[in-house]
Amino acid sequence: MGGKYLAFIFAYLRANIAAALEYRATLVTQVLGMILNDILWVVFWVLFFTRFPVVKGWTLEDVLILWSSFAFSAGLVYGLFFSVRLLPRLVVEGQLDYYLALPKDVLVHLLVSRIRPFNLGDALFGPLLLVTTVDLTGSRVAIFLATTLLSAAVLLGFEIIGGSLAFFLGSGDALHEQLGNALLHFASYPAGIFDGSLKFLLFTVIPAGFVTWLPVELMRSFRWDLFLGLAAAAAAFLGAAVLVFRAGLRRYESGNLLAMRS
């Protein structure tokens, strides 16, 4: 069963990417635009750390790793599974009816149904930034890939949970947008500037710590306990996402949302 779903996902993604390639000029322009935006952020941090070499234990290399990991994981999630950002609207407008009529799992089919070429620039920029600015070994490359994929899983689970709130709130588009923006904002800054209760919040309700800070720490010095903690967080957020989505979908199927769809 798992193999069939993986084959289905890859076939859908290939078809979506092939469709995007039909408009190569637009695709290249969007990808280059996102890469330029990322470069401007990196230039800002280079200038900042030129003046302040160490900020609460964080160096320029740490921030470069953060941006490499963050760009890659966010690019994968928002580039390949862009429908997750549209989930509240699909719920409220009754557009999940289309997926309910199909044989595959509703959530899986929903996630792979749309890509966003604009964000694929992030997925390309992350590894390029890493290999051009950070001293790498084979083990560090393996750690980067493993931790970035796990942080992408955390981010995807968080987005699904936020979008699924629309099943219960009757709307949720604005809340989903605010939650997503909050995570993206906090995850793009060094962990050292946050402390106390806010840092606790950023490892729980808004998991910025799992999305970027733990990957950086593991690239600094690999520790199995931190790696397993990141893997557990990825499993927890994806598991919770599936449970919340399915609970909401039962409300949707029962007709409780008929008023919103009419």
Image (cartoon, grey):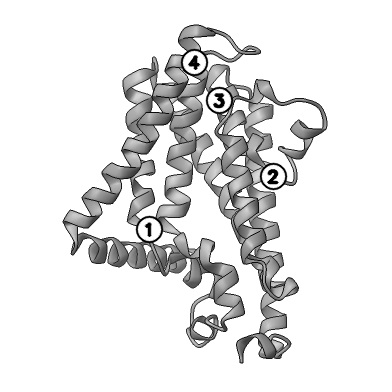
Q: Is residue 121 visible?
A: yes
Q: Is residue 71 above or below residue 54?
A: below
Element assignment for label 2: loop
Label 2 or label 1, whichever comes before in sequence order: 1
Element assignment for label 3: helix
Q: Give residue 124's quadrant in the image.
A: top left
Give left or right: position of 175 versus 197: left
For the residues labelled 4 and 1, the Cα–Cα distance comes to 31 Å
Check disc 2 and report the residue beneath it.
206
Label 4 or label 3, whichever comes before in sequence order: 4
For the residues labelled 4 and 3, the Cα–Cα distance comes to 19 Å
Q: Confirm or deny contact between disc 2 and disc 3 (CB under 8 A).
A: no
Amino acid tagged 1: Arg
Q: Mark on residue 48?
A: 4
Q: Position of residue 165 (x, y in %)?
A: 70, 66
Label 2 or label 3, whichever comes before in sequence order: 2
User: In front of the other: label 3 or label 1?
Assistant: 1
Check disc 3 and report the residue beneath it.
216
Give left or right: position of 221 versus 240: left
Residue at coordinates 41% horizontally, 64% vertically from top-left? 9
User: In front of the other: label 2 or label 4?
Assistant: 4
Q: Mark on residue 37?
A: none
Q: Mark on residue 116?
A: 1
For the residues labelled 3 and 1, the Cα–Cα distance comes to 27 Å
